[in-house]
Amino acid sequence: PPPHGVHRIHVRTPDNRRATATLVAAPPRVPQPPERTHGFLVQLYSLLSARSWGMGDLGDLTDLAVWAGRSVGSGFVQVNPLHAAVPGKPTDPSPYRPSSRRFPDPVHLHVESIPEYGHVRDRATLDDLRQDAAALSEAVLNKGALIDRDAVWELKRQALELVVQVPLTPGRRADYCDFLAEQGQALEDHALWCALAEVHGPDWHTWPETLRDPRSPGTARARSELLDRVDFHCRLAWLTAGQLAAAQRAAEDAGMGVGIVHDLAVGVHPAGADTWSQQEAFAHGMSVGAPPDAFNARGQDWGLPPWRPDVLAATGYAAYRGLLRGLLAHAGALRIDHVMGLFRLWWVPEGRPPTDGTYVAYDAEAMLAVLVLEAHRARTAVVGEDLGTVAPGVREALARRGVLGTSVLWFERDWEGDGRPLAPEKWRRDCLATATTHDLPSTAARLTGDHVTLRHRLGLLTRSLEEELTEDATDTAEWLALLARLRMLPEGDGDEEAAVRAVHRFLRRTPARMTGVWLPDTVGDRRPQNLPGTWDQYPNWRLPIADPEGHPVTLEEITASPRLHALMEVLRPRKPHTAPPGERRP
């Protein structure tokens, strides 16, 4: 058999006919995580520390990972997508609608950790920027302000403009040159798009026509004219990649068996860098969404142009391979949002309602083979978000390839039997088990019914408040009754903190390889980070982690929280008690 890799096969028949094909030779399965591990799930922007510049950053992520690995024995920290956002005022705050999935966003940089920061000569300007950043954090933490990504980026951009003026040492210069050579055309295109967006705006469809083609003579001239700005954005990509790598190394050094679990969004913004630089790979005029279902009779349009399966196949899945290689370079594992998209996606024609869409199939065997190959090269596990409508055979195909699924407690019922909550021993083993996600209510809100009243207040309910509350309370009561029968709720009814612990005690009882704890659950936060179906009605993707009363809490306060430590005691593996040798029975 051929060695693992992507091969190009050329065939010539005796009568001189010729053909070529791409062969992906991959191992049978992706690497697996260590047996039985637990970790935190967090939206990084929401995790502010005392040193943050108005939102959580890679310094905070590193600090959380080191503390979690050393203090509570966690094996991983899963974060939201850190993809590059489309710049704008305001910037789309959703991390799931990025400009590019191939490169991270420098807004996540911890500026003070950049080696050149300490050699900036204009200290007065840096000090002023740092004071302004402290004021942003103060407003979020103590004055009820929302996280303002644009304001954070404006301050960091000004600081980074000063930082990049510091000459690189010979060693740093060599590392930067290696990075440029490794990333090649992809990085150059991304940096050029960023530079052009500064001049012509963030939607490349509105640029002068000569600049809409990344390979046109006009674009080549612009590349020369904007050389300094292109280098600036290349430098930011290098700095961000360096801090991502440092976060993973720190997590591993702290004893984490997995480390940082990065997240791959299902698509990109139609006006962003990826659709400009890889125009031939996208189905322009189409959007990814979801068909009508029991929860949304109108279907969904996510505004994300899909990849063309024919172009992927014809190019040997080059764009897909490059995307995975970049994401896995500094990851301990990868979560794939809407992993069913490797099999099929619901395409919605531009200007038409989602009900007029249709499923378009992808070559799942090829998509999975490429995923397994790249994960094998990076030695990383893969978690697929397989919630919602899942076609028959999808979960089985993913399991054969070693891709873990996602199991959320409230959805795990015996749907083929009596519909009651699924007993822990009946859960699947190859999954990430959790009580909630970024799109769902926090555990405290679920237990109290607060999430129903919130949706009622925003006009999102399709039935009366009383009906919704009754159904929700019945659902919750069934779960609490099961927890009580299993003796996981010794404190009895009426103790919210105890119920949250019982839920996680249950998760630990399942055979799931990974158990995820939503970090806001550790301090009793009741607010969801994202409320599907809302835009301006709710501050999606802009909330800091808060306590039960809604007061924001810092990373330092979270890690010192008695509530958190009581919860994490539930997840600590119990060491078997062994009698001294002289007291053992024969």
Image (cartoon, helix red, strand yellow):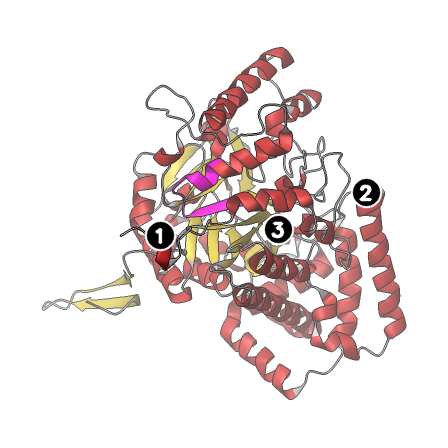
Give the number of callouts. Answer: 3
Assess disc 1: are there few (<14), some (14-19) or many (≥20) residues with their C-alpha within 10 Å of its C-alpha: many
Question: How far separated are the C-alphas under marks 3 and 2?
Answer: 34 Å
Identify the element where label 3 is drawn: helix
Q: Which residue is mark 2?
A: 145
Out of 506 and 541, give the one closest to the viewer. Answer: 506
**Point 76% across, 63% down: residue:** 157
Q: Which residues are magenta?
A: 506-516
Question: How far separated are the C-alphas under marks 3 and 1?
Answer: 30 Å
Q: Quadrant of residue 427?
A: top left
- Please say if the residues under marks 3 and 1 sit with CB atoms less than 8 Å apart: no
**Point 53% across, 34% down: residue:** 502
- Is residue 511 inside the magenta stretch? yes
Q: Which residue is mark 3?
A: 205
Dot in front, 3 or 2: 2
Q: Residue furthest bottom?
A: 170
The image position of residue 239, as x and y in percent, is 64, 70
Residue 301 appears anywhere in the view: no
Q: Residue furthest left?
A: 14
Q: Which residue is mark 1?
A: 367
The image position of residue 144, as x and y in percent, is 82, 40
- Report the quarter where the N terminus lies: bottom left
Query: Which amino acid is tagged 2?
Result: Ala
